[in-house]
Image (cartoon, rainbow, N blue to C red):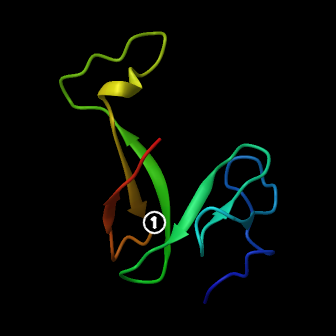
Amino acid sequence: MSESATAAKCPNCLTPLEPDAQAPGARTCPVCHFTERPCPTCGGWMWKQVEAPEDLGIEPGGLPLDRCEVHWVCRNPDCGQRLEAEL
């Protein structure tokens, strides 16, 4: 069962998600900028995920984002599709 864009809420701040004008089919939060997009494999929803290499030490100031990888990852546990993304 799919949710309509008006019924979906941001998992971070519970604000209703709105259609993303820059990415057809994607939905974004106008408050915290969380974005999700449809999975091309299963039709579920993908979220951006920032991943640091295992050997990368995480400092108290946060992640050195220029050395991390960003992927769209499908939230459907039966799918798990991964696509490259940009910050």
The residue lying furthest to the bottom in this view is 1
Task: Residue 72: name its quadrant.
Answer: bottom left
In the image, residue 31 sits, relative to residue 42, either above or below, namely above
Q: Amino acid at mark 1?
A: Arg
Residue drawn at point x = 49 percent, y = 78 percent: 44
Residue annotated with mark 1: 75
Residue 61, horizontal then vertical, whole percent: 49, 11
Q: Nearer the viewer, residue 53 or 1?
A: 53
Taking the image as shown, residue 35 lies to the left or right of residue 62, namely right
Q: Secondary structure at mark 1?
A: loop
Task: Residue 65: name its quadrant.
Answer: top left
Residue 18, horizontal then vertical, whole percent: 76, 65
- Total count of labels: 1
Taking the image as shown, residue 11 lies to the left or right of residue 61, namely right
Residue drawn at point x = 43 percent, y = 46 percent: 86
Residue 26, horizontal then vertical, whole percent: 60, 68
Task: Residue 84: name its quadrant.
Answer: bottom left
Q: Classify the position of the N terminus by image quarter.
A: bottom right
The residue lying furthest to the top in this view is 60
The residue lying furthest to the front in this view is 22
Residue drawn at point x = 32 percent, y = 32 percent: 68
Residue 62, horizontal then vertical, whole percent: 47, 18
Category of crowding for the residue at label 1, using alpha-carbon neighbours closer than 10 angstroms: few (below 14), some (14–19), many (at least 20): some
In the image, residue 56 sits, relative to residue 9, either above or below, namely above
